[in-house]
Amino acid sequence: MFFASDNSSGAAPAIMAAVAGANDGYQRSYGADALMQRATAQIREVLETPEAAVYLVATGTAANSLAVALTCPPWGSAFCHRHAHVAEDECGAPEFFAGGAKLVLVDGAHGKMTPEALAPQLARIGAGGVHSLQTGMLTITNVTEAGTVYTPQEIAALTALARAKGLPCHLDGARFANALVSTGASPAEMTWKAGIDILSFGGTKNGCLGWKRW
Ligand SMILES: Cc1ncc(COP(=O)(O)O)c(C=O)c1O
């Protein structure tokens, strides 16, 4: 047993074999290959989202940064937990890709934002005209950075506050599968049925290839 981190281990043998198999033969490029179409279809099926756009990226940091950049203007605010990976572990990448957007840190015990802590932060949007926070997005992590888990109901309570202000909502699902097993919720219940617009669906911590080993 090695408890340092779930991305310290090598990739799962079945995944290495699948990658080697995918290397055979010839395919169309730039995402038009058959495997990408299969992956898209499977993700849409699992999430019960027949029209979802699916993009594969190399790391969770890239996925999170792109999600923030897509939903938050450079002058806007991305609301996240004080100890969120986007705030503490991504070396400013979300702010960089969003062109300078501000991360607004929300409190909550054991890695979980509470509606009581989020509401007053959201109330700051536009409160001082051009001087104050401007609208942006909300990002939640499940499983959280503290190893705790939000239920779909808890996620829905947070997204309801954000959506009432017109904010799109993102879920950092680096450990999404673990959150599903822990709560018994379906992927749909944990995401769009709970008000989530964009999901970073992690693979590295579930045996896929990652960029780091230490
Ligand atoms: C909650 C969370 N989000 C995102 C990431 C980023 O993933 P990556 O290391 O693939 O950039 C991690 C990695 O540890 C994580 O724990």
Image (cartoon, rainbow, N blue to C red):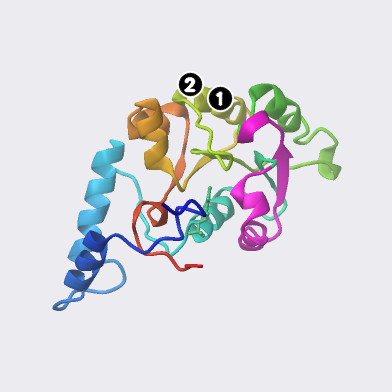
Mark 2, secondary structure of its residue = helix
Give neighbour class at mark 1: few <14, some 14-19, many 20+ (Cα, 10 Å). some
Which of label 1 and label 2 is nearer to you?
Answer: 2
Could you say where residue 23 lies in the image, as x and y percent from the top left? 21, 75
Could you say where residue 199 lies in the image, as x and y percent from the top left? 44, 44
Taking the magenta stretch, the answer to whether it contains residue 126 is no
Which sits earlier in the primary sequence, circle 1 or circle 2?
A: 2
Q: Is residue 198 left or right of residue 146?
A: left
Reading the image, the residue beneath label 2 is 153
For the question of whether residue 173 can be seen, the reply is yes
In this orientation, which residue lies closer to the viewer: 49 or 4? 4
Q: Is residue 124 left or right of residue 145?
A: right
Mark 1, secondary structure of its residue = helix
Q: CA distance from mark 1 to mark 2?
A: 10 Å
Q: In percent of the image, x 56 and y 48: which residue is there?
A: 71
Reading the image, the residue beneath label 1 is 160
Name the residue type under label 2.
Gln
Q: Which residue, as the protein is rendered here, is positioned at the far front?
A: 1
In this orientation, which residue lies closer to the viewer: 112 or 153? 112
Q: In percent of the image, x 47 and y 67: which residue is there?
A: 213
Q: Quadrant of residue 78?
A: top right
Relative to 195, say whether 70 is above or below: below
Could you say where residue 114 lies in the image, as x and y percent from the top left? 64, 26
Question: Which residues lie in the magenta part?
Answer: 83-111
Name the residue type under label 1.
Ala
